[in-house]
Each structure stands twice: as C-alpha cells, then as structure tokens.
Amino acid sequence: MFNKIHRFIVADILKNRIVLVYTLLLAVLAWSVFSLEDDSHKGVLTLLNIVLLTTPLVSIIFTTIYLYNSAEFIELLLSQPIRRARIWTGLFFGLFFSLALAFIIGAGVPILLFVTGAKATILLVMGILITAVFVALGFLCAIISRDKARGIGIAILLWLFFSLLFDGLVLFLLFQLSDYPIEKAMVGVSALNPIDLARIFIILQLDVSAMLGYTGAIFKDFFGTGLGTAIGFGLLCIWVIVPYLISLRMFVRKDL
Amino acid sequence: MIEIQHLSKRFGKFQVLRDVSLSCAPGQCIALIGPNGCGKTTLIKSILGMVLPTSGSILFKGKVIAKDFHYRHHIGYMPQKGRYPDNMTIGQVIEMIKDIRGSKEKLDEQLIDEFGLHDILEKRMRTLSGGTTQKVSASLAFLFNPDVLILDEPTAGLDPLAAEILKEKIISEHQKGKLVFITSHLLSELDDLVTHVVMMQEGEIRFHMPTDALKASTNTSSLAKAITHLLKQDHVQ
C-alpha cells in the first residue's frame, strides 16, 4: 500500500502564487546577471549572493506558513489509516520537491546555459541542498510552536541569524581573537552555518579563495581535498536530516 | 465495538478528560452533547488517535488502538471545520484520500452524486464556500463504507437541502447496523437520528443512556426538552 501524498502536495504548491513569483524572480535575476556580465565567473559570484539570500528566506518562510495553513488538512490525514511519520514525510518531500523545482526552473536553467563545467553542477547542487536545509528548518519552526505568529517569527529569526548575524559574530570573534592562530578553528565554525558551507563550496570552485586571505588558504587545504568535499557535503546533509528528524519525533508525539 | 476505559487527558494544567469510560456497540447512533469546552472534541480526537491519552486506553473491536493505525480503515470522520490545500481541486482531494486508503471495496459515492460534486470536480478548494467544503468532508467520510462514522457538527454550515440529504444518509447507514457518533448543539436536529445520548460535563460523562429511557425518565416528548429539563434540575439543586 504505497501512497504518494507528496505528489498531491507538489501539484498543490506548483500552482501557488508565491512559488510562481519566486521562480520568476530567480529567473529574472539570473538571466539579467548573466546578460550584464561578460565574465561568467563574476556572474556566478553575483548570483551566488542573491541565491544565498533569497532561497533560504523563501524556503523557510513558505514551508512554515504552508504547514500552519495545513493544520486542518493534517488532521484529516491523521484520521485516515496511515502512519503519522508517513504524513510528515509526504509533506516534507512535497515541499522540498516543489521548492527545489522552482529553483531549478528559475535559476538552474540560466546557470546551465551560461556556466560551464563543475561550477554549474556545484551551484545547482548547493541551491537544492540549501533549499532542503531550510525546508527542514521550516518544519522545525512549525512544530515547535502552536501559535502561527510565533512560529513564523522563529523562522524569520533563524533566517536572519544564518544569513546576517552569524557572519557578524564570526567577524567579531576574528577581531577579538586575532592574536591567536584560529584559522583552523574557523573551518569548524563554518560548519555551524549551512549558508556559509554552501558559499565556501562555490567560492573554492571559482578559484577566488585567495580573496579570503590566509583563512581561505586553510579552507582550500581542507575543503579542496576529496575528503574535505565529502565532509562538507555530509555536513550539509546533516543540516537537512537532524532538524527534520527532530521535527518528525515531535510530530509523532504531538496532540493535534 | 469501541470500548473506552478510564481515559484521562491533561493539557498542561488543564484536565480535559477525567476517567472517562464508555462502551459503544454497533447499531447505536450516539449523540455526544455538552457545553463548549467539556471535552467532546478531545474525546473524539482520542478515538481517532490524534490526541494521545495521558492514561487509560481505547479498544477498537477488542484491540488497543495505541500506536496502531490500521483500525482507522473502519472509521469515517467528518471534521467540524474542513480546510484543504488551496490549489487542490475537489477531484484531487478525493483522489488523494482514495490513494491513502487503498481500499479495494466498492466505494459509496452516493453523497458525491447527491451533492452534485461530480460537476465541480475541477474547482479548487480555495474557491469553495464553507458549505461546499463541508459537502466534500461529508462525502469523504462516507466514501469508504466505514463501520464507524464520527461526525463533528455535521450539518453546521450546510444549506437545508444538503443537511436533509446528509441526515437521510446518516439514518440509512445507521440502519445498516453501523455505529454513528454525532456531536451537535442543535438538539432538535438530533431527535430523529439518535438512539443514545452521551452527555459530557467538565471532562466527565454525566450520563449515557438510550434516548427513550431519557425521555421517559424526564416525562418529555423530545430530546431538546429532556436535556433542558435535566439542566434546569441541576440549576435548582
């Protein structure tokens, strides 16, 4: 008895206006960035910054709101003969697939057309992984609080933290501890932020890591190797799996 | 068929259900009544496995339902307030529930026919009025020929014609020997439907008795009068 809740969720979300606008926005930005820059290198860097700002924001907020709006629908699903875990998994894949598809259509197509080689693949894979991470975080936000406003508030704070505050904290630490050899520790610290992980991955692909200074060299030493890449990739996957599993555990035990 | 044993549930400080025990047999049509916040919905949700009890257990056909989900094949549930994903069509919603149920038995599409949903299968859920959404919920509850029907305020929001269709359907299913649970505040509506009344108050069951016995004991002719009579008695005491 295999059911495909996610298929119906995808069908629902792909007709959602916000997702359509998000796709269109990514497409407009990506096309204009590549048309304005002759050097696809610079184009990738510009696009990288746009993607790392918008994709997490849309993924986490949309997921959280969608889950809150589906409360009654989830109740109806719960009254059906189906395991709770399956409902949650169906919702997760439904949201992830549709937002990833929006990214692929919006940003992926121009990337594949204008960028060549491994860079294009890495950029695409990172975009999809970041989508997955922030969908998973959205699931966590929606299950933590019964109150919709608070849940969305947490989602916005998480996004703010990972895209702005975290870097500020790191800079602060760098200045405070500049007398100590903390370059190696920086590699560890970067694992605490999925957006930074994705950014490092792509920057290393572009051979502009020299811009990161001495720390950049350490990053290259670490993430540039096969093992480092695997670890970085694994870390991003952990960023998807752990928040999702925590939310799943809470959902299975929750009174709805 | 459904056996509730010493069920208690507390949400934080609130004791919503206190040691509720209830036994329901097939062929009964039970009205679950009581003031707002008396634990009706929590009781229903416990039977459906949405709320996990603090203590006590529920048996469905002799089996404990905790951590099981197969028993829900035999339950049709109509929520008080249905809300569906905005951009799904009626057809997709029905298709999806069919997919989840994976039921091989013949489907009961009578309500879909009588509510005229066939003609608007392409409509998106967002565009539907509250009443039409209720019609979809009702159709889904009866679609799989379940042995037990749990209807939470089924006629609220339906137009008189649709409400009548639904009532007829409830009566005919009940006559087939199914167990029906109805919660409603419209006592006059329940009169020709129910065989038993369960009255809840502050998380406890005040009484559970056949409608006839209730009317006889209060010397009244209708359910509404009987209940008002009892409530007034309370007041005097």
Image (cartoon, grey):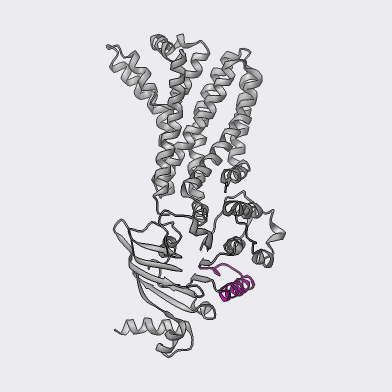
- Dominant SS of magenta comes to helix
Q: Could you tell whether A155 is left or right of B89 in the image?
A: left
Name above or below for residue A26 compared with residue A76: above
Q: Residue at x 34, y 69 (%)?
A: B202
From the top left corner, tell me how far across and down residue A215 is, in percent.
Answer: 39, 12
Residue B156 falls within the magenta-colored stretch = yes
Q: Is residue A148 visible?
A: yes
Whole-percent x and y of residue B85? 57, 50
Is residue A58 or residue A99 the one in the foreground? A99
Report the residue that reaches farthest toward the front. B62
Q: Position of residue A171 (x, y in %)?
A: 35, 20
For the view shown, which residue lies furthest in the right direction?
A: B119
In which quadrant of the rendered view does residue B109 lie?
Answer: bottom right
Dividing the image into 4 quarters, which one contains the C terminus of chain A? bottom left
Image point 42% across, 25% down: which residue? Answer: A235
In the picture shown, does residue B164 fall above or below B111? below
Q: Give the range drawn in magenta.
A: B151-176
Q: Horizontally, is B128 left or right of A192 in the view?
A: right
Q: How many labels does the image show?
A: 0
Is residue B158 located in the magenta-colored stretch of the structure? yes
Front residue of this view, candidates B155 and A77: A77
Vertical order, A141 against B145 (above or below): above
Name which quarter of the figure residue B51 lies in.
bottom left
- Residue A140 to residue A174: above or below: below
Looking at the image, can residue B76 be seen?
no
